[in-house]
Image (tube, rainbow, N blue to C red):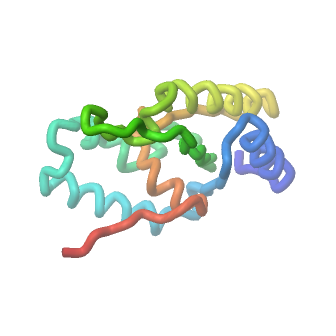
Amino acid sequence: MSMTDDLTQKVRQKALDVGFHKVGIARVSEASENQAAAVTSLRSWLEQGYQADMDWMANPKRQDIRRVMPGVRSLICVALNYYTGHDRPDGCEYGKISRYGWGRDYHRVLHKKLKAISLWLEAQGDDIQARFYADTGPVQDKVWAQQAGLGWIAKMVI
């Protein structure tokens, strides 16, 4: 089932209501050209050994979203600002920790919100199935987020 304009707007509002700051929707059928480029890039990255000991990056499901969820039509991508206004303590005895690590584990925070959206979404119709990940599944999350209009993937040229 592809999302109707009405359901699309409801999904966007629900994501904002549960606390996400941005939401975008990527249609799988529209992403085929971008997905092919992403798979080529992923394969090249893997061949160069950039995954180090992250063997899960080579999971074949990562190359085709339909292997993760065969009937998928759309991916809902969300963004949550993890900034905290707390100041880092002064002194060389304190290490520098990225701000996403200052609070609760972001996986737990995101999973709670994503679960709420998923349960709500599945209640919208018998033919709707949802699955959610917060960088925990075999999904090229950056690729889909870019496709959904939530940013871009940077590339450093040397």
Task: Answer left or right for 24 relative to 4.
Answer: left
Which sits in the foreground, 99 or 17? Answer: 99
- Percent across and percent down for residue 76 are 63, 46
Task: Answer left or right for 23 relative to 111.
Answer: right
- Percent across and percent down for residue 28 are 56, 55
Count of numbered circles on the image: 0
Q: In this view, does 153 lie above or below 83?
A: below
Residue at 76% from the left image edge and 29% from the top image edge: 120
Task: Answer left or right for 41 relative to 129.
Answer: left
Residue at 24% from the left image edge and 56% from the top image edge: 43
Q: Is residue 71 above or below residue 118?
A: below
Q: Which residue lies furthest to the front in this view?
A: 91
Q: In this view, does 18 lie above or below 1?
A: above
Q: In this view, does 36 lie above or below 117?
A: below
Q: Which residue lies furthest to the bottom in this view?
A: 158
- Percent across and percent down for residue 150 are 58, 59
Which sits in the foreground, 127 or 15? Answer: 15
Residue at 62% from the left image edge and 56% from the top image edge: 27
Q: Residue furthest right?
A: 6
Task: Answer left or right for 87 relative to 10.
Answer: left
Which sits in the foreground, 134 or 101? Answer: 101
The quarter of the image holding the N terminus is top right
Residue at 60% from the left image edge and 56% from the top image edge: 26
The quarter of the image holding the C terminus is bottom left
